[in-house]
Image: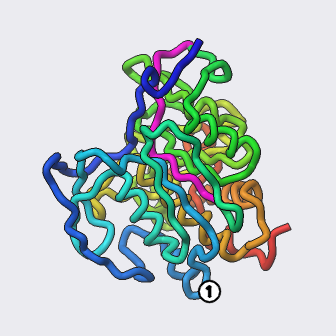
Amino acid sequence: MKFLQTLIAASLLGSALSSSALAQSTGSGDATDLLRPWMSKDVGEAWKQGYKGAGTTMTFVDDFQSKNFLRGKLGTKSENLLHGQWTLKEASLIAPSANVATQDFYSGTSVQLTSTGLNILNLSYAMYYRKGLDASKINWSQQESSIIDHAKNGLAVVSKAAGNDAVPIGRPNRSGNVDYLNTALRGATSAIYVGALSKNGAPTAKASLANYSNTAGTDLTTQNQFIVVGVDNSKTGLSGTSFAAPVISGYAAILGSKFTQASPTDITNQLLSTARIDTVVKYNPATYGRGEASLSRALAPVSMK
């Protein structure tokens, strides 16, 4: 049985306040190294220590070719950008010294990794098909097959948007479809599912899960791979777990610029194991997985064993 991208519908996992098929990028030319209102303050502290993603490579598998522009504001001006341009911009503003690469998510070709430095793959899309398939028996395209292999073999940190169906990872949505890319990454040594909070949390101002975000569910393996970050639509005009995954991609790049000898699995485990549970409302692992990502805690060790 052969299931390629032509049979499993690829779907982006983000949206904006408004969009226009005829819109063009405004090319705002925003300066880097400037802390944005939507960012965690931890990012600024990491920059002060000199960690901005240098020596790492973030690869974005996303929409870079359509005319489906989204309007939002991550920098100083509102812009109309493609979905992939938004995810790349978001992670790059967090880790401005990281190298970036792009691949259109309909390419079907293998995702290549660099031979030096930490590799990070940002996946802000889903692969949907009707429930009941065995993910292990799907004959994926070269693109998804390479991504899954990279994650299972610990060759790249894979930051995967959890999904916007408000269901546990691996469960069918209201249309009876399952994101089989999520299912295929279950248990992968360097894959992280990223859910969305409505804002960045704090012990004195806890955040709730965004009403659209998928949850970790009761499966322990999935819970251990699941983390959440703030996606504040009121500050950016953008919503969806599409814009949660790039935060983790940026964090991974920052960690990689400090812990230069750490493997993708080391970086993945560091992000997951240092997540906070005191910054979210009524923490439970079935909703929040490991909790809210904490860049400051992840960066804290002098070295990583």
Is residue 294 visible in this depiction of the protein?
Answer: no
Q: Which residues are magenta?
A: 119-132
Magenta-drawn stretch contains 155? no
Is residue 265 visible in this depiction of the protein?
Answer: yes
Characterize the local packing of mark 1: few (<14), some (14-19) or many (20 or more) Cα atoms within 10 angstroms.
few
- Residue at 48% over, 31% down: 127
Q: How is the image coloured?
A: rainbow
Quick check: 75 left or right of 287? Answer: left
Residue 47: image quadrant is bottom right
Q: Position of residue 1 (x, y in %)?
A: 59, 12
Magenta-drawn stretch contains 124? yes
Instruction: Please name whichever residue, 90 or 26, is drawn nearer the observer in this view of the structure.
Output: 26
Q: Position of residue 141 (x, y in %)?
A: 55, 30
Residue 286: image quadrant is top right
Magenta segment's dominant SS is strand
Q: Is residue 238 above or below residue 12?
A: below
Q: Is residue 227 above or below residue 250?
A: above
- Residue at 65% over, 40% down: 223
Residue 34: image quadrant is bottom left
